[in-house]
Image (cartoon, rainbow, N blue to C red):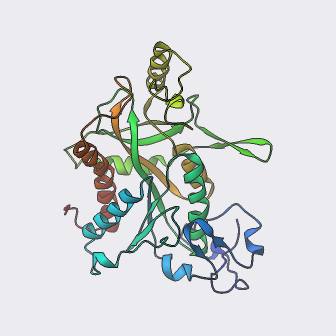
Amino acid sequence: MASVLPASNTSMRSDRNTYVGKSFVHVKNPYLDSMDEDVLYHLDLGTKTHNLPEMFGDVKFVCVGGSPNRMKAFALFMHKELRLMDNEEDIKDICAGTDRYCMYKIGPVLSISHGMGIPSISIMLHELIKLLYHARCSDVTIIRIGTSGGIGIAPGSVVITDEAVDSFFKPRFEQVILDNIVTRSTELDKELAEEIFNCSKEISNFPTLIGHTMCTYDFYEGQGRLDGALCSFSREKGLDYLKRAYNAGIRNIEMESTVFAAMCRLCGLKAAVVCVTLLNRLECDQINSPHDVLVEYQKRPQLLISKFIKQRLGLCDQTS
């Protein structure tokens, strides 16, 4: 585990293990300590240009999601839920200098967009994890809140992932590094998933369940859809694949969970994936619910995670 590298002085080092009772974010890169400066290019931040411990040192919850607009809406929602004193107008995009991602800080909560798919979220995670490391954050919980396609469950259901699996239904993430394939575990924190599920029992207006989540590299053929520009399989084979996924315990499909689980696990972050389903893939391929229905669906993971965060912080559980 690399040592702490304060943003303001690269010659000052301290051992995280001296902080008894705290779980610090760590990195698995021996070269970071020898760098005079670490530029987090896609976040428009850096160890020389910003005082990262001062800006982010109190972060305890990181919530990530694909859409910039959705993560801004979540930031504004959390501002109301936490009843913070500052004005909504003061909530600014910290990554405004780049058009890759957005980031908002609301008290101890960080809300960040990650785009779509494994490549986009993995770039964001590399720089986010280094940010938390340089900021000397401790006891951080990170949660992906997003949308997905359901398998055998009603649209609008919220799935808390207990196991992120690949397209072969295996709990692994395969990363090509140089000319090798490196396989990493996608184990998520089961106690965290149970804690979030227990929070859902107090929310009666939508169903919540724990199940496996399948992560694919593609939205169309990779998820057995018949409506893309290409389709190389029959309707029967596509439906059989989805039924086999259901029988393997998979309840939803998205495109980020395996790399998210693998990277967070390696860097000491307790992680969860909480996604709402927009359709039942055993019945259809296209998302055709009315816009207002989809907007309400997308708020469901936000509502649940808001309740979880407030419970962790010991705040009133009344929702604004």
Quarter of the image that includes the C terminus? bottom left
In the rendered view, tell whether residue 262 sits above or below residue 4.
above
Q: Position of residue 21 (x, y in %)?
A: 53, 70
In the rendered view, tell whether residue 196 sits above or below residue 231.
below
Q: Position of residue 206 (x, y in %)?
A: 23, 42
Q: Is residue 304 left or right of residue 67?
A: left
Q: Position of residue 49 (x, y in %)?
A: 60, 82
Q: Is residue 158 left or right of residue 273?
A: left
Task: Report the number of discs.
Answer: 0
Q: Is residue 60 left or right of residue 207?
A: right
Residue at 56%, 72% in the rendered image: 44
**Residue lying farthest to the right in this orientation:** 179
Residue at 73%, 63% in the rendered image: 29
Q: Position of residue 219 (x, y in %)?
A: 49, 36
Asked whether residue 28 appears in the rendered view, the answer is yes
Q: 72 or 188: nearer the eye?
A: 72
Residue at 45%, 28% in the rendered image: 249
Quarter of the image that includes the N terminus? bottom right
In the rendered view, tell whether residue 37 sits above or below residue 266.
below
Q: 179 or 317: nearer the eye?
A: 179
Residue at 50%, 62% in the rendered image: 101
In the rendered view, tell whether residue 142 sits above or below residue 292.
below
Asked whether residue 268 appears in the rendered view, the answer is no
